[in-house]
Image (cartoon, rainbow, N blue to C red):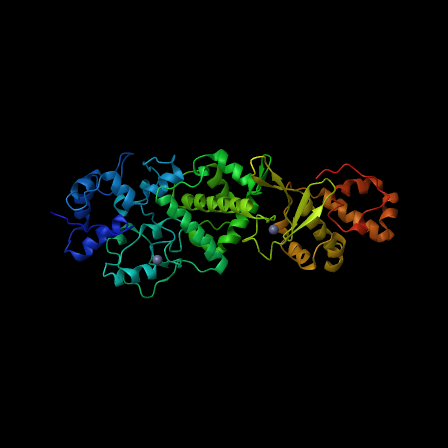
């Protein structure tokens, strides 16, 4: 049997070329055709060796491509190689256990085969056959890197379907629905995935856990040895949207998926999406940190996110302290090399927990806002989304003391009287003095060493 495959089109997936041949030629036995192309081992890869030697020989007259060139230009291997292996390592042992090699390492499952209407319009205009592009089939990608459009779904990418897959989809639905800001984030993910596919490795964190954890800390998700992966997971979901996370299969109420992606990189489709979106978040946040002239909350979708308005307060220790309307608080640490790092502090979460305690004790939101120096809408939000103000170290002691202090001041009508009544209670909350309203701090109090 002789198989004359077309010359592949730009960025075409391997299965797409074979499918076109199967569709255009009278191929009765597609399994035999695949065996002819891929060798006696058929469609299942067995070891770490390059898997396209046989295909390279069979297509030499038409393509003249080496096995390595086939792997680099017609498959998703370069993407996996950068995400999972040391940079430049051509072996991809991971996906081949799940993907047929003739597919070009297209993973089965979520979200399925994708195409861009504008790309296919372009094919029609050029009189090219419509074909399946690699950049659209990358894990985590839902927008076209050339047109910025949301890709359309053409069903699940089961191996059996790939060789008979049609390129006429008039009623295809979008791969995922989302808001404008989410589309911006998807676009950034698609561009990053495209970079990885084309052999660029823009970030050492893919292969170096130390670098990755350094970024986690720099972006405000860690302090010392503790990582706040729950907040990181929530911020990532806010940026990409719940629908996206569900479509990709990483929708979770917990942060286990994130812990796996960060600390135990393994292989598989879910893992590659997790690794990709985590890299997106850390790279995007650190770029924002380096380029922004003012402090931005890590949870903000953009520098001008109305849900994350940051104000600056002086806590008396000379270091500007930043409070976000979401309840998060931090200081910015500047290093000699010019890098800036966001260091979370306990003050903001303490104020938010105090607000919740006071609300449970019958205080009105307006009164709480005035006492704590917060805006009413922020107090409402922080109380409503109590989970968002989860204390950094699950410490609520200081917040309980602050609530008691405020009640004592209210009861006596004056902060100095409260100070005379209970000096010890004041000392428990004195470090927070710069954060809440002045009327709650006693003028009598001596400067107390502040510890944040
Ligand atoms: Zn397109
Ligand atoms: Zn915030």
- Is residue 360 or residue 262 the one in the foreground? 262
User: Does any portion of residue 179 appear in the rendered image?
Assistant: no
Q: In the visual, does 391 lie left or right of 207?
A: right
- Is residue 194 or residue 166 the one in the foreground? 194
Residue occupying image coordinates x 71% and y 54%: 374
- Is residue 270 or residue 63 the one in the foreground? 63
User: Does any portion of residue 67 appear in the rendered image?
Assistant: yes
Q: In the visual, does 54 lie left or right of 13?
A: left
Q: Quadrant of the C terminus?
A: top right
Seen in the picture, residue 373 relative to 87 is either above or below; the reply is below
Q: Residue furthest left?
A: 1
Residue 147, x across and y down, in percent: 37, 58
Q: Residue furthest bottom?
A: 170
Seen in the picture, residue 67 relative to 288 is either above or below; the reply is above
Residue occupying image coordinates x 25% and y 41%: 69
Residue 84, x across and y down, in percent: 39, 38
Residue occupying image coordinates x 43% and y 45%: 276
Residue 379, x across and y down, in percent: 68, 56
């Amino acid at each position: 049997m002789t198989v004359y495959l077309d010359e592949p089109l730009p960025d075409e997936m391997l299965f797409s070329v074979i499918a076109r041949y199967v569709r255009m030629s009278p191929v009765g036995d597609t399994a035999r055709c695949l065996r002819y192309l891929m060798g006696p081992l058929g469609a299942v890869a067995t070891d770490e060796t390059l898997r396209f030697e046989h295909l390279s020989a069979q297509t030499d007259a038409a393509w003249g491509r080496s096995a390595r060139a086939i792997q680099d230009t017609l498959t998703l291997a370069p993407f996996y190689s950068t995400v999972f292996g040391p940079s430049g390592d051509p072996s991809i042992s991971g996906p081949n256990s799940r993907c047929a090699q003739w597919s070009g390492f297209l993973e089965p499952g979520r979200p399925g085969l994708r195409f861009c209407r504008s790309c296919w319009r372009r094919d029609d205009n050029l009189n090219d056959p419509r074909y399946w592009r690699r950049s659209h089939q990358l894990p985590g990608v839902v927008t076209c890197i050339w047109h910025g459009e949301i890709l359309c779904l053409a069903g699940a990418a089961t191996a059996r379907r790939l060789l008979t897959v049609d390129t006429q989809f008039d009623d295809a639905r979008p791969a995922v629905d989302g808001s404008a800001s989410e589309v911006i984030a998807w676009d950034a993910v698609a561009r990053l995935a495209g970079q990885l596919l084309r052999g660029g490795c823009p970030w050492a964190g893919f292969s170096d856990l130390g670098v990755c954890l350094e970024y986690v800390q720099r972006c405000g998700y860690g302090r010392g040895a503790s990582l706040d992966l729950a907040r990181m997971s929530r911020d990532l979901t806010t940026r990409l949207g719940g629908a996206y996370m569900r479509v990709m299969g990483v929708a979770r109420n917990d942060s286990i998926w994130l812990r796996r992606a960060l600390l135990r990189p393994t292989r598989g489709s879910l893992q590659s999406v997790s690794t990709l979106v985590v890299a997106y978040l850390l790279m995007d946040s650190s770029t924002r940190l380096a380029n922004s002239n003012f402090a931005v909350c890590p949870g903000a979708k953009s520098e001008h996110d109305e849900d994350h308005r940051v104000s600056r307060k002086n806590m008396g220790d000379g270091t500007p302290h930043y409070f976000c309307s979401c309840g998060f608080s931090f200081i910015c640490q500047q290093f000699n090399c010019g890098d800036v790092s966001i260091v979370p502090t306990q003050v903001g979460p303490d104020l938010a927990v105090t607000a919740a305690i006071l609300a449970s004790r019958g205080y009105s939101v307006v009164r709480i806002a005035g006492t704590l120096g917060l805006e009413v809408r922020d107090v409402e939000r922080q109380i409503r989304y109590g989970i968002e103000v989860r204390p950094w170290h699950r410490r609520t002691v200081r917040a309980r003391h602050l609530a008691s202090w405020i009640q004592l001041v209210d009861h006596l009508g004056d902060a100095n009287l409260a100070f005379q009544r209970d000096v010890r209670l004041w000392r428990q909350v004195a470090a927070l003095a710069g954060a809440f309203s002045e009327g709650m701090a006693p003028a009598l109090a001596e400067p107390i060493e502040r510890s944040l």
